[in-house]
Image: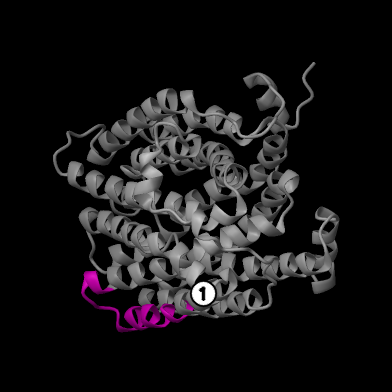
Amino acid sequence: MGFIGLRGIISAKMNSIDTKKDKSLRFSFLDGIFASAMIGFTQDYFTPFLLLLGGTARHVGILNALPNLFAALVQLKSADLVEKVKSRRKIINVFVCLQALILLPMMGIALIGAVNLYVFIAVVIIFTFFGAFAGPAWGSLMSDLVDEDKRGEYFGWRNRILGFIIIAFTFTAGFVLHIMKKVHIFYGFVIIFGFAFIFRIISWYFLTKMHEPVLEYKKENSFTLFDFLARIKESNFAKFVLFVAMMNFSVNLASPFFAVLMLRDLHFSYMTYSIVVVSATASIYIMIGRWGQQADRVGNLRIIRFVSPLIAIIPLFWILNRHPLYLVFAQAFSGFAWSGFNLCASNFIYDAVTPPKRTRCIAYFNALNGVALCSGALFGGFLLRYLPEIFGYRILTLFLISSILRLLVATFMPINLKEVRSVEKVKSDQLLFGVMGITRP
């Protein structure tokens, strides 16, 4: 797709924005294309590389826990640095560049082929650390560039297109590893990490071209994490953050170990692993645009309440059957539910928080969720050693525990949450028909 074509698409989607915003969204989309390529070559292949180095389920738990913990801690200072520098764009540019550079030692580790497991984990932590620091500033900047009544549609459209790019490159990485396994599997990881570096550098270049709308920084808009937590009884947004954090804790009890089950226990090939992983991602980005359209109409919270119980039952599919073809359909169902949850959780923040407080609130949201993800992965790794087997696998018992906790969180925690804007009230069957694009008879 040509440069002019991209501009035309974004202009059609966002015909109410001025020229500077139009250009910024165009550069942001170009950044997203190459950032998505980088994600496709990295996020689902850290665990396989760790297993290749000789990692165990315990190491996988640490790999999924510590990056989230450090990402959470660093974001507590992200908003402070943005306010000190008085520029979200500068923070984004610096830390995205640093994230790109850390992919070079990752290539070196793959080239050596034998390294202490904790050295690789440390590199992944630093990689995640730099990306996380830029996250709140990026979210705040993008929320200012997109009109309030178009966020669901715009981010759904954007994420759908970029999601398919992630899918394409995730599958490409799996194909590269499949081919290179016959030659030298470590060189396969050199290739995918090397291209990830190139893609991130290109995405960084487009980020430097973005315009930043003026945002006034006032002292009264600054508040600490403890101030934020102290208002959890009366603050709708604080209650929402706690709900999402508890859901992520319940999810991450099991989430890091799906790859372990596939690659170590079920002995899937890299290609089979990639197909199963990609099937969830494909479903996410097929459906995310439809969820976005519905969110603008019925509200983000309505959709979150609808999909949370669906997320709760996802691990049960893996307990029932583990044939690759069956898992593709199970993953498609997972993507259907997660696409609505992830999109609407992000957009709820944009609706619930005023622009001057948005960077800080996004940082606290990400920080608390990072701690929850870390705690879930560590606790899951700890439990795994002591659980009885289901159908010959302890991991399946962990999946069952995760499912039960998800269901409890999904049932009880959203009860007291309130939508923050006027929306249309619909029944669950009407919402489902709307998302599926079916006209109800």
Callout 1: few (<14), some (14-19), or many (20+) C-alpha neighbours within 10 Å? few
Q: Which residue is mark 1?
A: 85
Q: Nearer the viewer, residue 84 or 52?
A: 84
Q: In the image, 213: left or right of 9?
A: left
Magenta-span inclusion, residue 115: yes
Magenta-span inclusion, residue 321: no
The quadrant where residue 242 appears: top left
Q: Quadrant of the C terminus?
A: top right
* Magenta stretch: helix, strand or loop mostly: helix
Q: Could you tell me if residue 257 is visible in this image?
A: no
The quadrant where residue 333 appears: top right
Q: Residue at (61%, 34%) from the top-left corner?
A: 420
Vertical placement of residue 186 versus 7, above or below: below
**x%, y% of residue 60?**
28, 57
In magenta, the rendered stretch is 100-119
Q: Nearer the viewer, residue 424 or 168?
A: 424
Q: In the image, 10: left or right of 50?
A: right
Please, what is the three-letter code of the amino acid marked with disc 1? Val
The quadrant where residue 201 appears: bottom right
Q: Quadrant of the N terminus?
A: bottom right
Disc count in the image?
1
**x%, y% of residue 40?**
53, 63
**x%, y% of residue 51?**
29, 62
Q: Residue at (54%, 63%) from the top-left corner?
A: 137
Q: In the image, 424: left or right of 50?
A: right
